[in-house]
């Protein structure tokens, strides 16, 4: 990871981001430290463009700041911050409905629920396999085609983006349902609240590394 | 981008990487500079962990070095460095063969060629659409189902990974054929040499941001 700043240096950046422009004395007083104690931090942060030191104005956030934050923020980022809208249908509906939903919503996987709790996932490959088997897609319930819980790999909104991406790769799947796990009348309910997919990861990759 | 080093600082790192351990005097002499001229660079690079300064040993590469390189290297990385193996079949074959190839090779899209030149791409959605239309997949030629050139979005081995990922997102597709464009007997030939997909991007994302 690229985080090379000390805790105090990060505090200084946080103070400057709230109060810019702010003098070195004011920063020191907010930290309950003397200015001489933080002098080397200030000069280091300015040299590295984390801070922009302007005479007679004070310290402002420097341009370097945004860049490193991007990198370290992605390592800490949660699925809830980037997840897409899930497409969910009831397990009693025919496969046809899952296929139609896939095209209409332009997604790769459809999540299946029963009594508003996740019970399975249907991928494009599942759909193709069923059709090759000669299924009547307007009659076959999607619940028969789907990958069923507990074999579904899912994450919560609080899972980190990096862990979720690793699950996608290690399980060779296109997307993960994002669920909130609740207890209702003594039963565990998996409420689908999002979709985390290779598309989401790819978008994040582009945003992180594109020049613009 | 995170590259904050000056040209001279990068030269110093490059020298250390070749000759470590190496003294400050030796570094200076390789740069045709005096040691006092590069003293502030050496202390900066050591402070930032780009260099590891050891008494009586000299300068070694520091641990910070690898990390920033990772970040800037990804921005410069070419498709050829990460592309996967393409699955290519002839356009005269039936759709069934494309579907079987998709399952056997566990890929999302099949590239179609004619006379060893790319003429189209068949995605999983194309397959599903055809099957919904009631096609006899063992008879229907894949050339009828595919997205045909010039409507296929492709890249070359020399395209940057970031540009390729942006194409995937902007065109809402799962993968891009990687092609070498050649002239053969006055005709343009698109020879498929790789596959660049959201899976490739997601793997790269994991490698970049995972802690391990």
Image: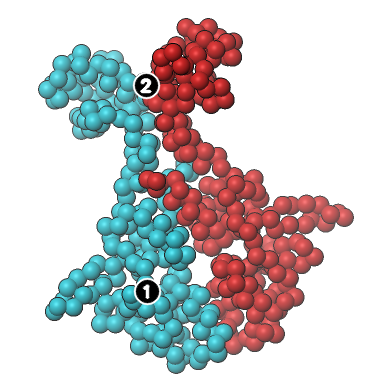
Chain colours: A red, B cyan
Residue B76 lies, with reference to residue B64, above or below; the image says below
Q: Above or below — where is B161 with respect to B96?
A: above
Residue B37 appears at what percent x and percent y?
A: 20, 16
Q: Nearer the viewer, residue B20 or A189?
A: A189
Q: Residues within 10 Å of mark 1 (few under 14, many from 20)?
A: few
Look at the numbered disc 1 and give the secondary structure of its residue.
loop
Q: Is residue A11 left or right of residue B21?
A: right
Q: Is residue B204 rendered to the left or right of residue B78? A: right
Residue at (47% x, 26% y) in the render: A61
Q: Residue furthest right?
A: A185
Residue position marked by numbered label 2 in the rendering: A47
- Residue A90: image x %, image y %? 73, 70
Q: Which residue is mark 1?
A: B151
Q: Visible in this render: residue B20?
A: no
Please state, as top left, top right, bottom left or bottom right, where the N terminus of chain B lies in the image.
Answer: top left
Residue visible at 20% across and 13% down in the picture: B36
In this rendering, position of residue A122 left or right of residue A90: left
**Label 2 chain ID:** A
Judge whether residue A27 can be spotted in this image: yes
* Secondary structure of the residue carrying numbered label 2: helix
Compared with residue A186, is residue B95 higher up or lower down, i.e. above or below?
below
């Amino acid at each position: 990871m690229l985080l090379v700043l000390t805790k105090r240096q990060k505090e200084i950046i946080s103070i400057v981001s709230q109060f810019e422009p702010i003098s070195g004395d004011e920063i020191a007083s907010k930290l309950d430290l003397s200015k001489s104690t933080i002098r080397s931090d200030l000069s280091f942060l300015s040299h590295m463009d984390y801070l922009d030191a302007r005479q007679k104005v004070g310290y402002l956030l420097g341009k370097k700041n945004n860049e490193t934050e991007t990198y370290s923020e992605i390592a800490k980022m949660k699925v809830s911050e980037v997840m897409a809208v899930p497409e969910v249908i009831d397990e009693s509906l025919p496969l046809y409905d899952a296929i139609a939903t896939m095209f209409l919503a332009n997604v790769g996987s459809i999540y299946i629920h029963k009594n508003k709790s996740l019970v399975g996932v249907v991928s494009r490959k599942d759909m193709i396999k069923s059709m090759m088997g000669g299924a009547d897609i307007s009659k076959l319930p999607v619940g028969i085609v789907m990958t069923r819980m507990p074999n579904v790999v899912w994450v919560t909104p609080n899972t980190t983006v990096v862990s979720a991406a690793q699950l996608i790769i290690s399980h060779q799947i296109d997307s993960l349902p994002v669920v909130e796990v609740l207890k209702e009348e003594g039963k565990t309910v998996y409420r689908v609240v999002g979709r985390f997919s290779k598309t989401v990861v790819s978008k994040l990759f582009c945003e992180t590394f594109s020049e613009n």
